[in-house]
């Protein structure tokens, strides 16, 4: 049956939705709509789009069938042996089966299956009109959108991100009737809260889009974001400046307004002596203002704010914005001035009053732990800088007790660096205080200094060790202490710095230090942490574009020195791309691995037991390859090492062809031949476990 295609317009009008919730809610709205329509057999050829502003979320569906697809079911019933008597008349079993499924006895058929003959029926369910189905399912679809937090209002039991004020639901211009939380769906919407607050009727998707523009509502978040960017750029250019790029703030502001309009304000000159990070953070955190700089990137005494309405009197609005900011900056100025009355290092003792985590002690205890770990790692990677590393460890958390960081937690590390600079510490020390927090998130820059990298590694490994020792590791999607993010940061730093630093030794050292404070099974926790790092490494490298087979093969041959694993992985990928021997070598290695899985013999090779020339030749080739491969791996020439291994394929294949490896009546000979294969396997495993390749 041919179905006509229709358009769906669904708008949920609410009180202001938090800006951080909006995009995630819209993404889920589309996903859940696709699932809902699929489960209800309603074809959608044009797909769904979700749009929204702080006070509305909108779902548009195009190419929607006007009815469900018919459903054909084949229902198996009782065996035919009990469905008919000896005269072929239907029994109660057959009649009951027909009655339950609302069919005539004449519609029953016999199905032949491997288990025998059974009654069955073909039942066709005619699809209902789409409008009828939507009346039933849309309330559940709307209510199933997951939000970080929901609320109830009035006497309603229904919960949503914010109270609902109206529902617009149209299928090809006709109202889809249903109700949620006492609100009946209809064809009424509303424009901008202040500039066009009156109700108006909507006839369809096209009319809705044009009507919203006329009523000062930009429904599409992407378009609204572009308008915010345009507004702030033009507003800043008017006073000869440019906005400091802040993608996160642009996204936030775009989800706070329905119709963006830029306003420029000025900053009192007395506040320009504040450190730039303080000025910028004070503007962006509470006020959502954009900082402005000159063409050389230097801050100038202006800001740009984004208004949710067209400004009638710019001077009045400007004064309001300036007055609020002046109060914020006055507080910040007091905090910075008061903080500087005490040297940063004096605040180390204050960390004794800051709880890091119940069971793991205070931040002071944490500093003491990762200082020892940082010293241990510095002995390997920068032994001449151990004293600087210890000083940075003592300084790097001290700003947590300052007033400015209490007010603006995102400035931790940044203000530690700032205060250290004011006190005259060397630039490397100051930079490392901030850099030990890097990278904060995926894609963030890595530390530029060895000092910052060492301290950052020590801090994170201590954190991971502590939570694993307390059995508070991530489970499923839950990771309340961001341990996965910390693990990725550790791996990225080790890879980026190209340090020949043993991850296993660092973890062991962290656990040894921790064991003086906490009781736990060190060996079990160590195994769990290394497995956790390995799993994170696989995830990280998959995101970098490496196939899972290659990652499994490289990590199975050793996972300790991260730059080494990465180099072997790159060599494997390059070898597979450029060498025709890759597939045949993989097959040979798998054959070797499959034989050795079942064998406990073959510990040592005795050349005197060789009987065939192929055994002697393979032994000679293995010894020669071992020496050369060892030299290549020592010098980091993994590509050449793989080509040397590929040279063993032919002698191994010849060995398989000319002798019986698993001889049954001669155990010494069998053990010797198995031993040959073990030596070959050990050589291959120095680079990768080729048995991990699936094809």
Image (tube, grey):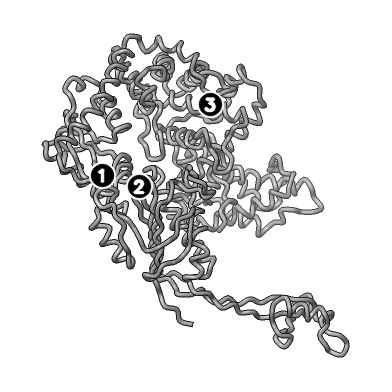
Residue at the spot 81% in from the left edge and 85% down from the top edge: 90
> Are there few (<14), some (14-19), or many (20+) residues within 10 Å of tag 1?
many
* Numbered-mark total: 3
Residue 517 seen: yes
| CB contact under 8 Å: marks 2 and 3 | no
Mark closest to the chain's N terminus, 2 or 1? 2
* Local secondary structure at mark 2: loop
Closer to us: mark 2 or mark 3?
2
Residue at the spot 37% in from the left edge and 45% down from the top edge: 16
> Can you tell which mark lies on residue 114?
none
> Are there few (<14), some (14-19), or many (20+) residues within 10 Å of tag 3?
many
CA gap, disc 1 to disc 3? 53 Å
Instruction: Indicate the position of residue 464 as horizontal and vertical percent values.
Output: 54, 30
Q: Which residue is mark 2?
A: 54
> Are there few (<14), some (14-19), or many (20+) residues within 10 Å of tag 2?
many
CA gap, disc 2 to disc 1? 11 Å
> Can you tell which mark lies on residue 308?
1
Q: Which residue is mark 3?
A: 506
| CB contact under 8 Å: marks 2 and 1 | no
When the figure is inspected, residue 224 is found, relative to residue 113, above or below; the finding is above
When the figure is inspected, residue 373 is found, relative to residue 622, above or below; the finding is above
Along the line of sight, which residue is nearer the eye, 1 or 498?
Answer: 1
Q: Image check: 434 left or right of 556?
A: left
Mark closest to the chain's N terminus, 1 or 3? 1
Rendered image quadrant of residue 304 = top left
* Local secondary structure at mark 3: helix
When the figure is inspected, residue 519 is found, relative to residue 179, above or below; the finding is above
* Local secondary structure at mark 1: loop
Mark closest to the chain's N terminus, 2 or 3? 2
């Amino acid at each position: 049956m041919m179905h006509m295609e229709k358009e769906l317009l669904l708008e949920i009008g609410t009180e202001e939705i938090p800006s951080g919730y909006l995009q995630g809610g819209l993404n889920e709205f589309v996903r859940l709509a696709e699932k809902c329509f699929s489960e209800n057999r309603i074809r959608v050829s044009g797909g769904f789009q979700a749009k929204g502003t702080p006070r509305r979320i909108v779902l548009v569906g195009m190419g929607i069938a006007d009815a469900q697809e018919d459903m054909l079911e084949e229902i198996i019933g009782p065996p035919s042996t009990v469905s008919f008597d000896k005269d072929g008349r239907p029994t109660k079993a057959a009649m009951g089966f027909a009655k339950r499924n609302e069919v005539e006895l004449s519609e029953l058929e016999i199905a032949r299956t491997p288990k025998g003959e059974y009654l069955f029926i073909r039942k066709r369910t005619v699809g209902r009109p789409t409008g009828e189905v939507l009346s039933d399912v849309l309330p559940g679809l709307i209510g199933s959108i997951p939000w970080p937090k929901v609320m109830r209002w009035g006497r309603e039991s229904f919960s949503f991100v914010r109270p609902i004020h109206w529902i617009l639901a149209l299928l090809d211009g006709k109202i889809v009737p249903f109700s949620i939380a006492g609100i009946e769906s209809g064809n009424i919407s509303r424009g901008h809260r202040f500039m066009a607050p009156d109700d108006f009727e909507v006839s369809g998707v096209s009319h809705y889009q044009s009507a919203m523009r006329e009523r000062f509502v930009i429904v599409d978040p992407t378009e609204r974001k572009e308008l915010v960017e345009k507004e702030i750029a033009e507003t800043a250019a008017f006073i000869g400046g440019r906005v400091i790029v802040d993608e996160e703030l642009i996204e936030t502001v775009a989800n706070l307004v329905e119709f963006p309009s830029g306003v420029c304000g000025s900053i009192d000159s007395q506040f320009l002596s504040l450190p730039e990070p303080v000025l910028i953070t004070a503007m962006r955190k509470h006020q959502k203002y954009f900082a402005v700089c000159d063409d050389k990137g230097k801050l100038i005494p202006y800001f740009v704010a984004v208004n949710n309405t067209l400004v009638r009197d710019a001077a009045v609005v400007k004064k309001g914005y300036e007055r609020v900011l002046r109060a914020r900056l006055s507080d910040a100025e007091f905090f910075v001035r008061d903080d500087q009355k005490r040297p940063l290092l004096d605040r180390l003792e204050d960390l004794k009053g800051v709880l890091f985590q119940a069971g793991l002690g205070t931040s002071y205890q944490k500093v003491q732990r990762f200082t020892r770990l940082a010293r241990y790692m510095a002995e390997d990677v920068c032994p001449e800088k151990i004293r600087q590393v210890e000083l940075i460890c003592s300084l790097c958390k001290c700003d947590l007790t300052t007033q400015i960081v209490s007010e603006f937690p995102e400035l931790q590390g940044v203000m530690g660096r700032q205060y250290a600079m004011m006190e005259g510490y060397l630039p490397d020390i100051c930079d490392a205080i901030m850099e030990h927090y890097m990278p904060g998130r995926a894609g963030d820059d890595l530390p530029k200094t060895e000092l910052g990298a060492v301290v950052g590694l020590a801090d994170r490994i201590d954190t991971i060790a502590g939570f694993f020792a307390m059995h508070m590791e991530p489970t499923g999607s839950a990771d309340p202490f961001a341990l996965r993010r910390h693990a990725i940061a550790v791996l990225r730093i080790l890879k980026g710095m190209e340090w020949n630093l043993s991850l296993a030794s660092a973890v062991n050292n962290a656990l040894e230090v921790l064991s003086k404070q906490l009781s736990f099974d060190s060996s079990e926790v160590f195994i769990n942490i290394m497995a956790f790092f390995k799993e994170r490494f696989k995830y990280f490298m998959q995101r970098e574009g490496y196939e899972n087979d290659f990652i499994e093969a490289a990590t199975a041959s050793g996972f300790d020195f991260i730059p080494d694993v990465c180099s072997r992985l790159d060599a494997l990928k390059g070898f597979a791309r450029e060498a025709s021997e890759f597939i045949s070598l993989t097959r040979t290695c798998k054959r070797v691995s499959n034989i050795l899985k079942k064998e406990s013999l073959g510990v040592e090779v005795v050349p005197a037991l060789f009987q065939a020339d192929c055994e002697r030749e393979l032994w000679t080739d293995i010894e020669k390859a071992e020496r050369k491969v060892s030299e290549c791996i020592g010098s980091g020439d993994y590509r050449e090492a793989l080509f040397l291994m590929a040279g063993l394929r032919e002698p191994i294949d010849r060995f398989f062809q000319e002798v019986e490896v698993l001889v049954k009546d001669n155990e010494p000979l069998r053990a010797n031949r198995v031993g040959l294969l073990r030596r070959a396997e050990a050589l291959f495993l120095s680079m990768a476990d080729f048995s991990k390749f699936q094809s």
